[in-house]
Image (cartoon, grey):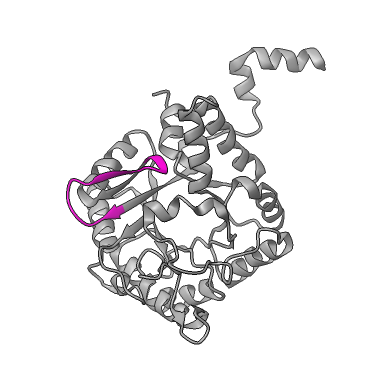
Amino acid sequence: MFKRFRRLRINETLRNLVSETSLSTQDFIYPLFVVEGKNIKNEVSSMPGVFQMSLDSILKECEELVEIGLNSIILFAIPTLKDSVGSECLDENSLISRTTQAIKKDFPNMFIVSDLCFCEYTDHGHCGIIDPKTNTVHNDKTLEISAQQALVHARAGVDMIAPSGMMDGIIKTLRKVLDDNGFENLPIMAYSSKFASGYYGPFGDVAQSAPSYGDRKTYQMNPGNRLEAIEESLADEAEGADILMVKPALSFLDIIRDIRNRSNLPLAAYNVSGEYAMLKHAGIAGLIDYDRVMMETLISFKRAGADIIISYHAKEACLLLKGK
C-alpha cells in the first residue's frame, strides 16, 4: 500500500487522474465593482489586483474573463450619491442596471449575479433602513425596499439575485415578489450563513461601505454559533433559496461541511476580502508561494463541500488552470 501511494505521488498525470477533488474554471464567480465615470480602473491598496472600474473598463475586463473561461461574475455598484435609504438602487436607470444591460449586450453568455443590499448605497453604510428608535436596522422595512430593489435588478436582466443583508424572511419576500412579477425562473442565491466577521475589512475599502457607526452584529451571525448557522441555511432553503452560501469561507470550512451534509442544494463559499488580502500581501512579501497556497486554499473549499467559489482569486486561478 505504501509503495502504491508513493508511485501516485511521483506520477503527476496519474495523481491528477485519481484526485478526489479538483478545480475548474466553471467553479468560480468573480466579484466586480463598478463606479460612475470613464476610463477608471483604480486599484484598491488593501487588495492588490482588485479594482474599482467604470463601465467601459468593466466591459474590457469581461472580455478578458471570457477569454480564460471565467463566465460568471457577481456585480457590486458604488454610486456617487448615497442617502439614508439607498434610493439610487431603486432607480431603473441605476448604475447596476446600466452595467448589467451593457454587459449583456456585449457578452450575452456572461452569467451576472447581482448583489442585493444597501450598504454600498447608504450614507450610514448599514445593510438596510435604520429604525430611529433603536438606531439599528429595521428588518421589515428593509424587506419592503429590498423587494423593490430586486425588481430593478430583474428588469435589468441579471441572471441571479444574491441578497447579502441577512434580513430575516428575505428569501421568502424576494421569491414572492419575483414570482408575482413574472420572474418565476430567476434564481436566488442566499447569503444563508453569513457571519459578523473581521475578515470583511478590506471590502469596506473597495465597496466604500463600512458602517459609519456601530457594527453589523445585530443582523449577521455570531462566528461561534455552529448550530444556528446550519438552521439559518435550512430556513433559507425552506423559504425557496436556490443556492445556499457560507461567508466567510476559510475559517468556516466546518460549517460548509455541516450544511453539505444536511442539504442537497448547490452550496457556495464566499472567499472574502480579508482572506484574499492575507494571501496577496504574504505573497508580495515573499513569505509564501502565492500561487500554490492560493490553489490549495481554493481546493479546500471544494473539499469541504462547496460547489461554487466566489473569490477575488478567481481570475488568477483560471489563468493557472488554463496554463497561462
Q: How many marks?
A: 0
Q: Position of residue 29 (x, y in %)?
A: 44, 47
The image quadrant that residue 296 belongs to is top right
275 or 144, nearer to the observer:
275
> From the viewer's perspective, is residue 37 above or below residue 170?
above
Q: Quadrant of residue 239?
A: bottom right
**Residue at the (56%, 54%) spot, across then down:** 198
Q: Position of residue 44 (x, y in %)?
A: 36, 45
Quarter of the image containing the C terminus? top left
Q: Position of residue 61 (x, y in %)?
A: 28, 41
Q: Nearer the viewer, residue 246 or 35?
A: 35
Instruction: Please say if 134 is above or below 161.
Output: below
**Magenta segment: does it hold 40?**
yes
In the displayed orientation, state which residue is furthest to the front: 213
Question: In this view of the protein, can residue 31 be seen by the observer?
Answer: yes
Q: Is residue 112 visible?
A: no
Q: Is residue 166 above or below residue 36?
A: below
Span colored in magenta? 34-49
Q: Residue furthest left?
A: 38
Q: Residue 301's spot in the image, x, y percent?
A: 60, 42
In reply to whether residue 152 is colored magenta, the answer given is no
Considering the image in quadrants, where does the N terminus appear?
top right
At x 51% / y 28%, what residue is drawn? 290
Decide if residue 267 is on the left or right side of residue 148: right
Q: Residue at the spot x=67%, y=56% of the render? A: 259
Please determine whether, in this image, residue 246 is positioned above or below residue 319: below
Which residue occupies 57% across, 46% down?
A: 307
The residue lying toward the viewer, choosing from 275 and 75, is: 275
